[in-house]
Image (tube, grey):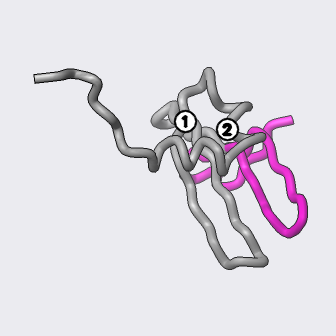
C-alpha cells in the first residue's frame, strides 16, 4: 500500500519499519522520481537520509547503515602514474 506522507510535495511512503527505536522509511518523490531512505534513531538522536538508485531501494531500506557507510567511504584510485 502506498501512503502519502506529504501530498503537497509529491512525497510518497513506499515502506516503513521500526525496530529497537530505529525508524526507517523508504520514500519516493513523484516530481523528481528520486527514491530515498530516512533513518531516525531515537536512542542516539542520530538521523540521516540518502538517495538511492531504484534498483537498490529495498536493500538500502533493509540495510540503511551499510548503504550509508558505503557512501562515506573514500574512493581509492587504482590508477598508477
Number of numbered discs: 2
Identify the residue at horizontal 57%, vertical 61% (top origin): 48
Task: Residue 45: give x, y in percent of width and height.
Answer: 67, 78
Q: CA distance from mark 1 to mark 2?
A: 7 Å
Residues at marks 1 and 2 touching, judged by CB atoms closer than 8 Å: yes
Q: Tell which circle, 1 or 2, labels the residue nearer the N-terminal end.
A: 1
Where is the C terminus found, in terms of image quarters?
A: top left
Q: Quadrant of residue 20?
A: bottom right
* Disc marking residue 2: none
- In the drawing, does residue 65 fall left or right of residue 24? left
Front residue of 59/33: it is 59
- In the image as oriented, which residue stretches furthest toward the left? 81
Circle 1: element type: strand
Q: Main secondary structure of the magenta part?
A: strand
Q: Could you say which quadrant of the image residue 66 lies in?
A: top right
Residue at image coords 63%, 72%: 46
Residue located beneath label 1 in the image: 52
Q: Give the residue at mark 2.
A: 60
Q: Residues within 10 Å of mark 1 (few under 14, many from 20)?
A: some
Instruction: Identify the residue at image location x=71%, y=32%.
Output: 59
Q: Residues within 10 Å of mark 2 (few under 14, many from 20)?
A: many
- Position in image of residue 71 (x %, y %): 47, 44
Q: Which residues are magenta?
A: 1-26
Q: Give SS at disc 2.
A: helix
Q: Position of residue 70 (x, y in %)?
A: 52, 41
Relative to 66, does residue 18 appear above or below in the rendering? Answer: below
Q: Position of residue 78 (x, y in %)?
A: 28, 24
Amino acid at each position: 500500500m502506498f501512503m502519502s506522507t506529504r501530498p503537497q510535495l509529491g512525497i510518497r511512503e513506499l515502506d516503513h519499519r521500526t525496530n529497537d527505536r530505529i525508524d526507517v522509511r523508504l520514500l519516493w518523490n513523484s516530481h523528481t522520481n528520486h527514491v530515498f531512505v530516512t533513518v531516525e534513531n531515537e536512542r542516539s538522536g542520530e538521523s540521516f537520509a540518502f538517495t538511492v538508485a531504484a534498483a537498490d531501494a529495498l536493500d538500502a531500506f533493509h540495510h540503511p547503515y551499510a548503504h550509508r557507510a558505503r557512501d562515506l567511504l573514500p574512493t581509492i584510485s587504482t590508477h598508477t602514474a
